[in-house]
Image (cartoon, coloured by chain):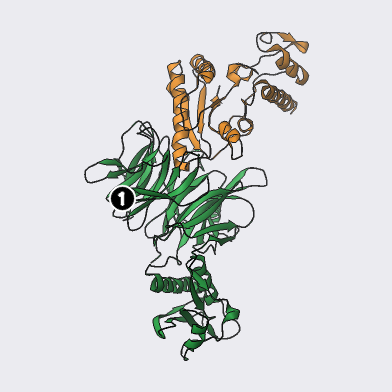
Chain colours: A green, B orange
Amino acid sequence: MSRVLVALLFLCTLAAPAQAALTIEITRGVEAAMPIAVVPFAWEGPGAPPLDVAAVVEADLERSGQFAPLPREDMLSRPSPGKPVQFRDWRLLGIPHLVIGRVVALGGDRYAVEFQLFDVFRAKALRGLRYTVPAARLRSVAHRISDQVYEALTGIRGAFDTRIVYVVRKTGPDGKPRYTLELADADAANARPILRSREPILSPAWSPDARRLAYVSFERKRPEIFIQEIATGRRERIASFKGLNGAPAFSPDGKRLAMVLSKDGNAEIYVMDLATRKLTRITRHWAIDTEPAWAPDGASLAFVSERGGSPQVYRYYFADGRIERLTFDGKQNLRPHFSPDGRLLTCINLDDQGRYRVAVLELETGIMRVLTDTKLDESPSFAPNGSMIIYATEIRGRGVLAAVSVDGRVQQKFQVEGEGDVREPSWSPFLD
Amino acid sequence: MAKRWQIVVVLAAGVLLTACAGKGTKPEEEAGGGTAPAVEQRALPGEGATATGTGLGTGAEGEALGGGQVQEVHPLDQPGSLLAKRVIYFDFDSAQVKEEYRPVVEAHAKYLASHPSAHVVLEGHADERGTREYNMALGERRANAVKKLMVLMGADPNQIDVVSYGEERPAVLGHDESAWSKNRRVEIVYKRR
């Protein structure tokens, strides 16, 4: 009997076959996107290559909104590593940067992938690397190549080889809701459920090593906080106090979990030491305190409080227990999340017209800018390189995911195949 | 088996009548989700329906109906009564129990006070606007506001549990004020009567 239960649990939590394919569509790109050519990689091996690596790189760069890849049919030549590149061809096409590469089958599920990035006008190699991986890792290598190209040309570390987690709500054949916690690559490929439930799942949060997720599950008809190991599916109930157990957030060192509990009367922020399970109470106020977010240095927490009459973002400093108010623009500001460098804070801003939109607050100046033009945005979180913010919104009555660049110039929409609401996205840290 | 059928018919009639009685005071969710109203009375199908339709309580109590059966409508099931109302609605971003709902809260508080073994769960809900965790806290705050009032009006705090569903369980789907106003609510769900 118990063996059956264990097996069932495994079925529910372990990676099951992908069911909801996700695609990303750029809804707004940079006007002066940088032209680039990603030449199809040469293939040295039997039959067809297991993956069109160049196509993945090209799609990554295009999706960033900052690059305009040259269509393959417009290429005058298809150079590969080890042979001289005719830079004149690419200058004629007005292409300043060129990516070439090669995939070699080494036998026994080993593949060598190499790439080179060239500055066409100076006829100079900017970067080149070689990776040896099994077929299953080729897609990840392609993203790493995108990361290299992106960093060489923008000066910002790429975040293509990362993941996102989100919640999908669908209606089951019995008319009742079904919830899945799903994981996908940052390019929306490989979407797969890691938890299924008939009760709500919310607030997934990454551990800083990207190996674990904390989330809230109603599987026992009340909110409880769990931590699940992604690779094994093993999970543990972390908080199940009377009342609310919500809004988990790992500290930057991964040793503590900030959370919201109402066991002492109303919603307050606590920090749990994960080794000892000891709780430290952070806030003490009759008003709602919720949605804690760690500053990247771990020295302070941003959180939402309605102690001033409306929900606004405040900041608590561990050193002296001081609390300061951070947001003043708009009727409400909710769900803060720090940029990886700690200079910016994204949150949901409610304006006079009743619109809940993604905003960015520059902490040094206090200047807040609204980035989106939707009305019911939720759950904004930064990509680990700070370039984009992923969030949930509602378009034509349906919950969808979208992303916007920090300057507002690039916007993407994530499309999930089939019906269902998608919500509660969170972008992973870097995976290494 | 036959008894089951009777109960189903009485139940169906009761649900129908309450649905007509109050304007939207009894969302579908209650019938499906929380407590399926336990029906304790025994009656013949037709008579049960008639009794609930016309009688409303006083007449039904102890009144012998055809076949010598005793028809008792549980006070919580009396259509149109304050106790039949199980949902309290709130203003946007507010946890204040509005004046118009105080009689409902009071009726349940009095019932709890006079039935010490009765137990309720107050389910707090919010509309979809705003963020999910904030709405979890808001839903709890609404349920706590109702609990506090019930305790002031005589209920024992141990008779009342509170759970917040935030915006996760809307009573009505939709993205406008008409849907939102029905989702900002506290549902009173009897676990024991």
Number of marks in the image?
1
Residue A92: give x, y in percent of width and height.
Answer: 51, 84
Instruction: Give percent across and percent down for residue A262.
Output: 39, 35
Q: Is residue A420 above or below residue A260?
A: below
The amino acid type, in three-letter code, at marker 1 is Thr
Q: Is residue B183 visible?
A: yes
Which sits in the foreground, A23 or A184? A23
In the displayed structure, does residue A94 sit left or right of residue A327? right
The chain letter for the residue carrying disc 1 is A
Label 1 packing within 10 angstroms: few (<14), some (14-19), many (20+):
few
Foreground residue, A88 or A281?
Answer: A88
Determine whether the residue tagged by mark 1 lies in a helix, strand or loop: loop
From the top left corner, tell me how far across and down residue A243 is, in percent. Answer: 43, 35
In which quadrant of the rendered image does the C terminus of chain A lie?
bottom left
Is residue B1 or residue B45 the one in the foreground? B45
* Left or right: residue A208 compared with residue B142: left
Picture residue at 66% right of the left edge, 10% below the top: B61
User: Where, by quadrant of the figure, is residue A78 drawn?
Assistant: bottom right
Q: Is residue A297 above or below residue A113?
A: above
- Relative to residue A399, is residue A162 drawn left or right? left
- The percent position of residue A164, horizontal first and vertical second, equals 48, 58
Q: In which quarter of the view is residue A329 placed?
A: top left
| Residue drawn at (64%, 17%) of the image | B78
Please, which residue is most extreme toward the left here? A320
Q: Is residue A30 above or below residue A348?
A: below
The answer, for residue A215, to whether it is visible in the render is: no
* Disc 1: which residue: A365
Q: Which residue is nearer to you in this view: B93 or B66? A: B93
